Image (tube, rainbow, N blue to C red):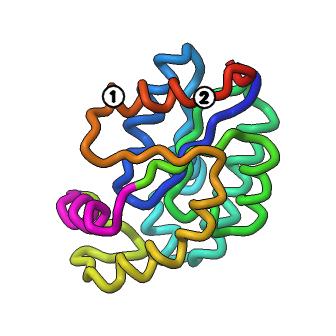
Amino acid sequence: MRRHIALNGFMGAGKTTIGKKLANRLGVRFFDLDALIVAEHGPIDVIFDRLGKAAFRNFELTALTRTVEDEQPGVIALGGGAVTHPPTLELVKAKTLSIWLYLSIDETIKRVKSAKRVRPLLGPNPKDSKIIGLYTGRLSVYRQSDLIIPAAGKTPAKLVTAIVEQLPKELL
């Protein structure tokens, strides 16, 4: 592969699950930005509580910079808000083929609310209005992705196939 693939999308879109399977299918490494941050700085909720969102966004930028500069091309699962940080968005645009795993707001609410994982920006019992506000606030940056892949109603295997079928041949 000639360039990293960056998966973005809102919480619950399946970036990590699909990223692992896509990397396996393409025979490349998988990088989970959140996992890289946790390994270096500790739990994400603790980072948000102690250092704030701005510090977390800078950790994302640093982890992404290291990955795209130091590693052979692979598949990267970005955090749901990573591309809302302008320097991170610029790096994604410059160094990756970005793919938005698109879910409707209704599907997003359903997935986020049914997840057992607490999201630092939403808290333990997220309200629909909070999810909608974050979601709509991120749409303009998600729409800047190189590819937009509808994710609802597809098994992970079918979603990976849909992505592979749309990848530019010059990337592979």
Question: Percent x, y for residue 117?
Answer: 27, 59
Residue at image location 25% in from the left, 58% down from the top:
111
Q: Earlier in the sequence, mark 1 or mark 2?
A: 1
- Residue 15 magenta-highlighted: no
Magenta segment, principal secondary structure? helix
State which quadrant residue 120 falls in. Answer: bottom left
**Which residue appears at 35% of the width and 83% of the height?**
130
Image coordinates of residue 64 in percent, x first then y, are: 69, 47
* Quarter of the figure with the N terminus: top right
Residue positioned most to the top = 27
Q: Is residue 161 above or below residue 104?
A: above
Q: Nearer the viewer, residue 148 or 98?
A: 148
Q: Mark 1 and 2 residues: CB-CB less than 8 Å, in contact?
A: no
Reply yes or no: does residue 114 show up in magenta. Answer: yes
Within 10 angstroms of label 2, few (less than 14), some, or many (20 or more) residues? some
Question: In this orientation, which residue lies closer to the viewer: 22 or 146?
Answer: 146
Query: Where in the figure is residue 47, as x and y percent of width and height?
Result: 52, 68
Name the amino acid, label 2. Answer: Leu
Residue annotated with mark 2? 167
Q: CA distance from mark 1 to mark 2?
A: 14 Å
Residue under label 1? 158
At label 1, counting other C-alpha atoms closer than 10 Å, the crowd grade (few under 14, some 14-19, many 20 or more) is few
Q: Could you tell whether 131 is left or right of 128 in the image?
A: right
Secondary structure of the residue carrying numbered label 1: helix
Q: Which residues are magenta?
A: 103-116
Farthest residue toward the bottom?
A: 129
For the point 33% across and 26% down, which residue is it? 157
- Label 2, secondary structure: give it: loop
